[in-house]
């Protein structure tokens, strides 16, 4: 997978915020027709006691959801944990894993925010610009904004607003289970992002691409390339 070098990573927190504000202007919140043959999920583990984390990219064949490729990158994370600047902490390791990918995806789902971010530039937007691919942020919690009550049935959603601006949606992916928070990452519109998250859910709260990427980042996904089979835990239904 091609990774574009838009900026360096050794920056101060003030410089990081300026980069976010600048690059946010380049995020595309529209898309053409997306007919994905391959869909990717991206996630990163929490650092261990030595500060080493694992970034994971899982490439799935759509609509079968069979695993085509799994790539991992491990390294120490140096950038501090600062809400709103997590993409500077996590992107370098994620992009290192992306560089190993041989099967470039048509659509990417990332466990994190897209434009549902105070500066409209979360992890999914940051990675989306570096890869220049359609990218969706699918987070497990809100970073900013508010929404009305979401219906209990799977597929129900409520607009996520911040100061009157639409920045994403709370989406119920499984009946009577907590919603996820979907936002545009890059090169896609919100309606399409919601549609693709729903299409990629297979009875779990998380869509299959990010669910498997989470397992891969945690070291709980075993992929056998020759047979295209995988073994993974089933404790998160």
Image (cartoon, rainbow, N blue to C red):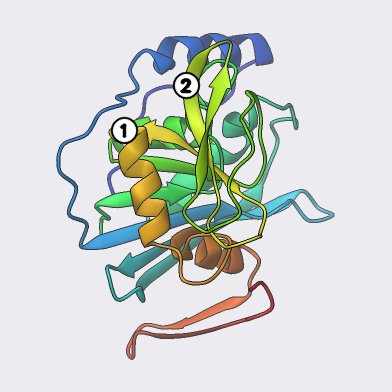
Q: Which residue is mark 2?
A: 166
- Whether residue 70 is visible, yes or no, is yes
User: Could you tell me which secondary element the residue under label 2 belongs to?
Assistant: strand
Between residue 126 and residue 236, name the one nearer to us.
Answer: 236
| Along the line of sight, the residue nearer the viewer: 187 or 199 | 199
Image point 27% across, 68% down: which residue? Answer: 62
x, y (%) of residue 136? 41, 42
Q: CA distance from mark 2 to mark 1?
A: 12 Å
Q: Is residue 118 above or below residue 135?
A: above
| Residue designated by label 1 | 189
Q: Position of residue 53 (x, y in %)?
A: 67, 53
Mark 2 or 1, closer to the camera: 2
For the C terminus, the quadrant is bottom right
What residue is rendered at 22% in x and 57% in y?
36
Instruction: Tell me residue 51's x, y (percent).
Output: 77, 48
8, above or below 64, in the image: above
Question: Which quadrant would residue 57 be assigned to in this image?
Answer: bottom left
Q: Residue furthest bottom?
A: 227
Q: Residues within 10 Å of mark 2 (few under 14, many from 20)?
A: some
Number of numbered tags placed on the structure image:
2
- Residue ID at (36%, 60%): 199
Q: Say above or below: 134 vs 215.
A: above
What secondary structure is marked by label 1?
A: loop
Task: Determine the image quadrant of residue 216.
Answer: bottom right
Q: Say if residue 102 shows up in the picture.
A: no
Horizontally, is 144 left or right of 80 in the view? Answer: left
Front-most of 133 and 163? 163
Horizontal and vertical percent position of residue 29:
31, 26
Residue at left offset 49%, top offset 24%? 167
């Amino acid at each position: 997978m091609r990774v574009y070098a838009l900026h360096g990573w050794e920056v101060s927190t003030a410089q990081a915020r300026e980069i976010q504000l600048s690059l946010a202007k380049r995020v595309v919140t529209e898309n053409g027709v997306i007919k994905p043959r391959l869909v990717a999920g991206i996630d990163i583990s929490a650092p261990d006691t030595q500060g080493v984390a694992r970034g994971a990219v899982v490439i799935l064949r759509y609509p079968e959801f069979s695993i085509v490729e799994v790539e991992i990158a491990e390294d120490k994370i140096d950038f501090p944990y600062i809400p709103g600047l997590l993409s500077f902490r996590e992107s370098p390791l994620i992009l290192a894993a992306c560089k190993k990918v041989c099967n470039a995806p048509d659509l990417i789902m990332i466990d994190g925010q897209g434009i549902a971010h105070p500066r409209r530039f979360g992890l999914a937007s940051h990675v989306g610009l570096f890869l220049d691919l359609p990218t969706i942020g699918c987070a497990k919690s809100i970073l900013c904004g508010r929404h009305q009550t979401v219906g209990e049935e799977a597929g129900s959603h409520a607009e996520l607003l911040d100061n009157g601006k639409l920045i994403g949606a709370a989406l119920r992916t499984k009946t009577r289970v907590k919603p996820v928070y979907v936002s545009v990452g890059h090169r896609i519109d919100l309606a399409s992002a919601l549609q693709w998250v729903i299409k990629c859910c297979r009875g779990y709260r998380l869509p299959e691409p990010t669910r498997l990427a989470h397992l891969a980042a945690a070291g709980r996904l075993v992929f056998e390339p020759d047979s295209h089979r995988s073994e993974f835990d089933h404790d998160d239904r």
